[in-house]
Amino acid sequence: MSRLQLRPWRLLSSPPRGIRGLALLALTALSLAAGSDCPCPEPELCRPIRHHPDFEVFVFDVGQKTWKSYDWSQITTVATFGKYDSELMCYAHSKGARVVLKGDVSLKDIIDPASRASWIAQKVNLAKTQYMDGINIDIEQEVNCLSPEYDALTALVKETTDTFHREIEGSQVTFDVAWSPKNIDRRCYNYTGIADACDFLFVMSYDEQSQIWSECIAAANAPYNQTLTGYNDYIKMSINPKKLVMGVPWYGYDYTCLNLSEDHVCTIAKVPFRGAPCSDAAGRQVPYKMIMKQINSSISGNQWDKDQQAPYYNYKDPAGHFHQVWYDNPQSISLKATYIQNYGLRGIGMWNANCLDYSGDTVAKQQTEEMWEVLKPKLLQR
Ligand SMILES: *[C@@H]1O[C@H](CO)[C@@H](O)[C@H](O)[C@H]1NC(C)=O
Ligand SMILES: *[C@@H]1O[C@H](CO)[C@@H](O)[C@H](O)[C@H]1NC(C)=O
Ligand SMILES: *[C@@H]1O[C@H](CO)[C@@H](O)[C@H](O)[C@H]1NC(C)=O
Ligand SMILES: *[C@@H]1O[C@H](CO)[C@@H](O)[C@H](O)[C@H]1NC(C)=O
């Protein structure tokens, strides 16, 4: 049930100044190599980004043109999960932000080293022809600990990283992982091996109800405690916090309640997922912009759950059924994001940037700005 992921990192100083002639020469060589088909207004916008930011803001984009309204003062990487958009690539480069491909492949197809190599070669070539700065590997498949897929996956990440770094200067290779390393959704992965093998992991701190083992009731997409326990577990297995980017949801879940009790307990249908009796598959994912439009017509008004540190509301649909909607807002996100500074994570990101309202409507504009604002690193509390 997990759907997405992210990633970032690397510490390097800005390119040395001086030696102008050399830089110019390099530029000329590059634009020649890049060929005449650079789609950007300036040929240098087709060059890969080489700067490595201290703090990563990793954004997933799923298409269309909403990216024009993103807060580019913060973005360091855009993972493009929609159609290729050369205008987005040129614009991101003009803002010093990387643009990376989506990488997904059926693991049974890359157990053989030769098929792995050919998949990687194809991705590197695509990245070069589209002037991209790397790849975000989003494999959310079930893997058995004792299967050949287990080692093949680690090898895939290692070989992809080595090839991209060699072929595209400054490129970034990241890997999306579940909210916890503890076999979520039957994903037995070599997390330490994968973290070592790539630039960083994008931790998908959402879809945390993909496997509900206790009572089948609606709950938060990314409860506070559960989310932070996941990071503690990654760090306990000695993954460097600088290899972890916190992924937060800009969407929520709308559950139809079989029964809604007076104290707001919403019983949900039993929809099994990978061995668990119920899951968030009983609900429907809804973007933040829709949630913000619906709250005012709810029957409960906005509620705050103290245990999960998350907002929710109840509403009645036209057919008379009760629903409960759980989501994240600036308050719940900023509580979790405090962990980033306290534990020295590499950055933050979200699935996905398109979920906000960029229509320019006055109320929506304010809500959208607040969501971007909480991504900014907070001052350490001493
Ligand atoms: C994980 O991968 C690393 C690098 O390939 C390897 O050295 C290590 O033995 C693997 N760990 C496990 C538990 O398989
Ligand atoms: C269903 O909701 C009603 C109304 O709040 C409540 O009285 C009843 O106990 C609930 N039933 C179950 C099985 O939870
Ligand atoms: C919802 O209600 C609040 C408080 O009355 C108001 O400020 C806000 O503009 C309303 N939002 C929408 C989308 O109508
Ligand atoms: C969350 O974690 C804190 C600290 O470990 C604990 O005191 C608290 O009871 C937990 N809350 C819930 C709802 O699990």
Image (tube, rainbow, N blue to C red):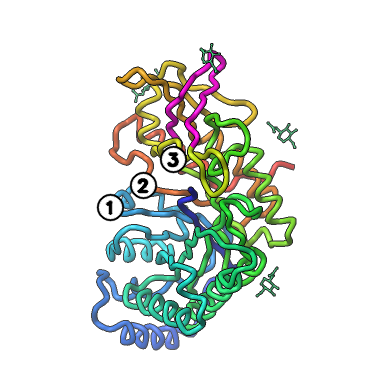
Q: In the rendered image of this protein, does residue 80 appear above or below residue 365? A: below
Which three-letter amino acid code belongs to the residue tagged 1? Gln
- Indicate the secondary structure of the residue bearing disc 2: helix
Which quadrant is home to the C terminus?
top right
Q: Secondary structure at mark 1?
A: loop
Q: Name the residue type under label 2.
A: Asn
Which range is magenta? Answer: 250-270
Residue with the mark numbered 3: 251
Instruction: Mark 2 and mark 1 in contact? Answer it, CB < 8 Å.
Output: yes
* Mark sitting on residue 354: 2
User: Residue 64: which numbered mark, if any?
Assistant: 1
Label 2 – label 1 distance at C-alpha: 9 Å
Residue drawn 43% across the image and 65% down it: 104
Q: Residues within 10 Å of mark 1 (few under 14, many from 20)?
A: few
Q: Is residue 187 above or below residue 134?
A: above
Q: Residue at x 42, y 60 (%)?
A: 79
Q: Is residue 264 magenta?
A: yes
Q: CA distance from mark 1 to mark 3?
A: 18 Å
Q: Tag 3: residue type?
A: Tyr
Which mark is first along the chain, 1 or 2? 1
Q: Which percent across, then down, holds residue 296?
A: 38, 20
